[in-house]
Image (cartoon, helix red, strand yellow):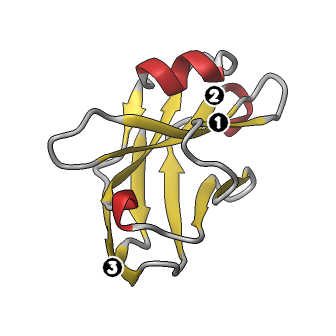
């Protein structure tokens, strides 16, 4: 399994970024996929998760409609659109996948099996 993120960078507060994740070695059809973030000195947070069992997308409570996760199963790609960015959104963003296709809320709380190396998002004030 390989997960490779791209699209991070420096953006001003209020701006937008689109993160991409190229996945290989597993099928989106039977895995949950998601995005997580971790800021320096802080705990990891579950940003979003797509369940392969019901096709729904779940978000961490802090997202509040600013971020949107999507996927292209044919291309094994997942995306995270980040809008209305704030300095507190500065973090490493990681895509991930899990063999248990359901249980997104659990995944958001406890993580997933497979991880990318991350892409850094820096939001300036």
Q: Which residue is mark 1?
A: 27
Work out how far the residue at label 2 is from the one at label 1, CA to CA, in angstroms. Answer: 7 Å
The answer to which of marks 1 and 3 sits earlier in the sequence is 1
- Tell which tag, 2 or 3, sits nearer the viewer: 3
Residue at 52% from the left image edge and 64% from the top image edge: 20
Please determine whether, in this image, residue 50 is positioned above or below residue 80.
above
Q: Callout 1 environment at 10 Å: few (<14), some (14 to 19), or many (20+)?
A: some
Q: Callout 2 environment at 10 Å: few (<14), some (14 to 19), or many (20+)?
A: some
User: Residue 14, percent across and down?
Assistant: 52, 79
Q: Callout 3 environment at 10 Å: few (<14), some (14 to 19), or many (20+)?
A: few
The answer to which of marks 2 and 3 sits earlier in the sequence is 2
Q: Is residue 21 left or right of residue 117?
A: right
Frontmost residue, 28 versus 20: 20
- Label disc, if present, on residue 31 of the rendered structure: 2
Work out how far the residue at label 1 is from the one at label 3, CA to CA, in angstroms. Answer: 39 Å
User: Residue 107, percent across and down?
Assistant: 53, 22
Residue at 40% from the left image edge and 59% from the top image edge: 89
Residue at 67% from the left image edge and 59% from the top image edge: 75
Identify the secondary structure beneath mark 2: loop
State yes or no: discs 1 and 3 in contact (Cβ < 8 Å): no
Work out how far the residue at label 2 is from the one at label 3, CA to CA, in angstroms. Answer: 37 Å
State yes or no: discs 2 and 1 in contact (Cβ < 8 Å): yes
Please determine whether, in this image, residue 26 is positioned above or below residue 81.
above
User: Residue 60, percent across and down?
Assistant: 57, 36
For the image, the number of numbered tags is: 3
- Tell which tag, 2 or 1, sits nearer the viewer: 2
Quadrant (top left/top right/bottom left/bottom right) for the C terminus? bottom left
Q: Which residue is mark 3?
A: 125
Residue at 47% from the left image edge and 21% from the top image edge: 109
Identify the secondary structure beneath mark 3: loop
User: For residue 27, which quarter of the picture?
Assistant: top right
Q: Is residue 103 left or right of residue 41?
A: right
């Amino acid at each position: 399994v390989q997960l490779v993120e791209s699209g991070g960078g420096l953006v001003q507060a209020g701006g937008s970024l689109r993160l991409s994740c190229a996945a290989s070695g597993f099928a989106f059809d039977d895995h949950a996929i998601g995005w997580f973030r971790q800021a320096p000195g802080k705990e990891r947070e579950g940003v979003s998760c797509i369940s392969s069992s019901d096709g729904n997308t779940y978000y961490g409570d802090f997202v509040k409609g600013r971020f949107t996760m999507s996927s292209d199963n044919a291309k094994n790609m997942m995306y995270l659109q980040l809008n209305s960015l704030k300095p507190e959104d500065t973090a490493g963003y990681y895509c991930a996948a899990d063999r248990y296709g359901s249980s997104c809320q659990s995944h958001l709380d406890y993580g997933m099996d497979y991880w990318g190396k991350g892409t850094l998002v820096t939001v300036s004030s």
